[in-house]
Image: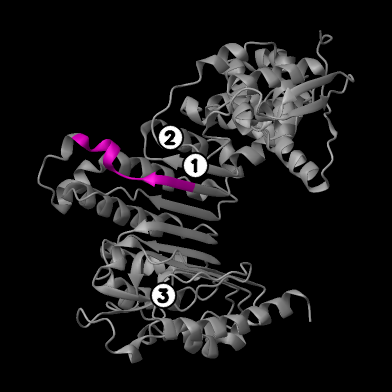
Amino acid sequence: MPPEHPKIRIPDELWVKIISSLPPRDCRTLRGTCRTFNDVFTERAFSQLVCTSTASSLNGVCQCLESDLSEYVAEIQYRHWSATQHSIQDRARTPDVQSIFQSRKTIGAWFKRMASSFHATRKLQSLIFIFDPNLQSVPSLYEDRLALQNLTIKLLATFSSRLNLQNLSLVNILPIGGDELVVPAFLGVLAGLRYLTISMHLFDTSDGGHFHQTILPVILRHSVLLTSLTLTSTHDVGSEPGISLHDATLPELLSLELGHILFDERTGVEEFILRHSGSLQRLKLENCRSTRPAPSADLAQEPEQARSWVEIYRHLSGALGKLDELIVIEDGIRPMNVNGPARIFRYSIWDANVRQWVVSGGDRREVEEDSVALKEFQAMIMLKQSGL
Amino acid sequence: MPTIVSVDDSTVPGEGSSRLLLLVSSDNKHIVVEEDIMSRSRFISKQVEGFEATSQRHAILLPFSSFVLNKVIEYCSHYRGYYLLEDDPDAAPPGRSPVREWDQEFLDVDRNMLLRIIKAAHYLEIKSLVGSCARAIADMIRGKTTEEMREILGVENDFTPEEEHSPSSKCTG
């Protein structure tokens, strides 16, 4: 059997795992046991806080921010950020904005308490809000979420002005509340950001027009220091309604990720990429297709509107060749579109790391042209990877 | 809490269909175990893949004692044929799973043994066992005073008296 009190050293990351299952009070006690725990683990364990909208989690994070542990906090992630856990009793009522704000008092008050402690943190640079995507079609859930989203952004604008906020992620945000994002206080927050993620929760392809055409350009105009921009959406945007990237220029942009943003000529996506080709080092395109509604059941009509990879490739190849990292992901045609009213043209089913190209859509002629362009592109990537 | 999902008996490989591995502990004990049992360990799986590439079989040397290794094998044997969410996030079918009470009894060992097991599980890349050990260790010190935690974890107070009374390392019991 082991001798009395031997020193069994385990890697720091295991201690972080152990600490992460302890409540803040016990963590503080643990810090007081010896120098190692105090110096190493506190910093590691509290640099990132994860908060969900349950009472215990909100309370834990509040306690942490209000204690001397706050000086270690560099990032707070709000996951499943939702008002619904606190509002079950209110859901039967007919929601109007005022009553929702009343019923939001609980979570709103928690968040306000939390946000008012932001100024005490020395290292907090990163705030990540992952709103609960589960809205189903219950109207009050939607209203709840919207109210929470607006409240979150409003408090963020109020309380993060004194922060040196570098990274902001808004995931699953509803487009309808977007106006809150362009109030002057929030634009002030944007001005200092280096990393911005906006991930839209849309209900269908016709949703989000106001956001993408009006609000997004304002946001991008104010986020002048961005080195990393991620714009994604749950449904394709860029055709109808459009998305406007025509005027945006981010002089320091190194990394660009787009998801479900269509390479429609009206979006200005290609020009946006070309405009940043001098600084861009990383480009990730996920399910960025070209699409148009079929004019009738006869899908053979109007092929001139389709944009093939050949066309895109000619336009972008010069810029793409300078990238250090290029990732293109195509999930393939989603089942809902196979027999649906919209026709999807696959023009970019490639990935710098994947040698094989599988075609499962588009007409034959277009596919053949695409495969020639793809081969050229792959050859260029291989040349680049071999360091020539 | 950890989650487990059982698979149909029909999908569990039959006895004897698995190859044998030779594991060698730091106290030079040779332990023969079925590959299936140890496939939960990503470390072992990667080693085995390496063997296949060279079509050679080797013993796998492990930097912990047979006492600890046997405990890990016991764990892996118990969960043979189960998908554990932490180990197989892709394979595990969705749905509610029972809480692993067995782990609590299995890990009802002294602190040193627990630390040795978590270290071995970390080395072998068995996430579910690392998670269970981490929770077990956290449970041991939950709600304890600073002094009790020192006792349980076998650490010594190496703060200077000034540090101990400064707010940044203030102890709350």
Extreme-right residue of the structure? B28
Quadrant in the picture for the C terminus of chain A: bottom right
Indicate the amino acid at tag 2: Ser
Mark linked to residue A370: none
The magenta stretch spans residue B160: no
CB within 8 Å, label 2 to label 1:
yes
Q: A42 above or below B53?
A: above
Name the image quarter holding the N terminus of chain A: top right
Front residue (pair A239, A76): A239
Alpha carbon separation for disc pair 3 and 2: 40 Å
Secondary structure state at the residue bearing disc 3: loop
Q: Is residue B171 left or right of residue A205?
A: right
x then y, percent, for residue B110:
70, 11
Q: Nearer the viewer, residue A333 or A269?
A: A333
Q: Secondary structure at mark 1?
A: strand
- Magenta span: A77-88
Tell me which label, 1 or 3, sits earlier in the chain. Answer: 1
Instruction: Give the percent coordinates (x, y) of residue A268.
Output: 42, 85
Query: Counting residues from the N terminus, which is met first, the one under dot 2 or under dot 1?
Result: 1
- Between B21 and B2, the residue placed more toward the observer is B21
Pointers 1 and 3 within a single chain:
yes
> Residues under labels 2 and 1: Cα distance?
8 Å
Would you say residue B173 is visible in this rendering?
no
> Which mark is first along the chain, 2 or 3?
2
**Labelled disc at residue A50:** 1
Q: Is residue A54 above or below residue A237?
A: above
Q: Which residue is under mark 3? A: A289
> According to the image, label 2 marks what residue?
A57
Q: Is residue B166 above or below residue A76?
A: above
Q: Does B42 sit left or right of A363 as displayed?
A: right
- Circle 1 Cα neighbour tier, 10 Å, few/some/many (<14 / 14–19 / ≥20): some
